[in-house]
Image (cartoon, helix red, strand yellow):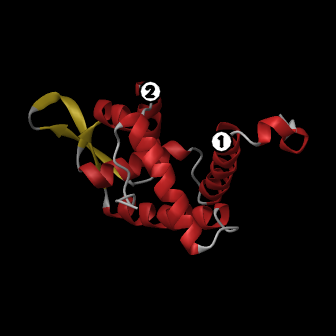
Amino acid sequence: MDPLNTPVRLRGHATWLLGQASTQGHRLIGERMHAAGVTSRSYYSLLVALAESGPTSQADLGRRIGLDRSDVTAVVTDLEERGYLERTPDPADRRRNLVNLTDSGAKFLGELDKEVVAAQATLLEPLSPEERDVLLGMLGRIVEHHTGLRVSGTEER
């Protein structure tokens, strides 16, 4: 669908507007990730999840970020080859490995964080800082209402 030729009636629907904003956000993140040498947003999600949780099994990582087991294996293998992750035997169950972020992986995640922040700033560029806060608060309330997930930064507004 060409957004410029979208029927006027659709342009007024919140779902259409949110979809278009999401498409642009994903495009901007994708461009930044590609420039940083990352082929998928899943790399960033996986690194963030590991930084937050500490050593974790691949299966748990996949469940946490909504990524299929085979895709988790491919991402973990690539990041391990780059020296950003390491797999070690789980002391509680030697049949499985735990994935852990290395120091260079934490540094790389910091670089990716900067790219994500820059993409967010570009996406929200037309809005004032106050409008950005209001938008994030409203989106957070919508997500919480429909999923029960409390979104960071959306405390009572």
Corner quadrant of residue 98: top left
Q: Quadrant of the C terminus?
A: bottom left
- Residue occupying image coordinates x 67% and y 55%: 28
Residue 83 spot, x, y in % from top left: 39, 54
The reply to whether residue 81 is in sight is: no
Q: Which of labels 2 and 1 is toward the front? A: 1
Which residue is outermost to the right?
A: 5
- Number of residues whose C-alpha sits closer than 10 Å to that of mark 2, classed few (under 14), some (14–19) or many (20 or more): few
Residue 9 spot, x, y in % from top left: 82, 36
Residue linked to disc 1:
14
Q: Quadrant of the N terminus?
A: top right
Q: Nearer the viewer, residue 38 or 126?
A: 126
* Disc sitting over residue 109 in the figure: none
- Residue occupying image coordinates x 67% and y 68%: 125
16 relative position to 73: left or right: right
Corner quadrant of residue 8: top right
Residue 96 spot, x, y in % from top left: 21, 29
Q: Nearer the viewer, residue 52 or 88?
A: 52
128 relative position to 59: left or right: right
Residue type at mark 2: give it: Asp
Using the numbered discs, state the Cα–Cα distance from disc 2 to disc 1 in whole angstroms. 30 Å
Which residue is outermost to the left?
A: 92
Residue linked to disc 2:
68
Give whichever of discs 2 and 1 has the lower sequence position.
1
Residue 55 spot, x, y in % from top left: 23, 46
Q: Is residue 129 above or below residue 105?
A: below
- Number of residues whose C-alpha sits closer than 10 Å to that of mark 1, classed few (under 14), some (14–19) or many (20 or more): few
The reply to whether residue 30 is in sight is: yes
Q: Nearer the viewer, residue 96 or 42?
A: 42
Please count the marks in the image.
2
Residue type at mark 1: give it: Ala
Q: Nearer the viewer, residue 99 or 19?
A: 19
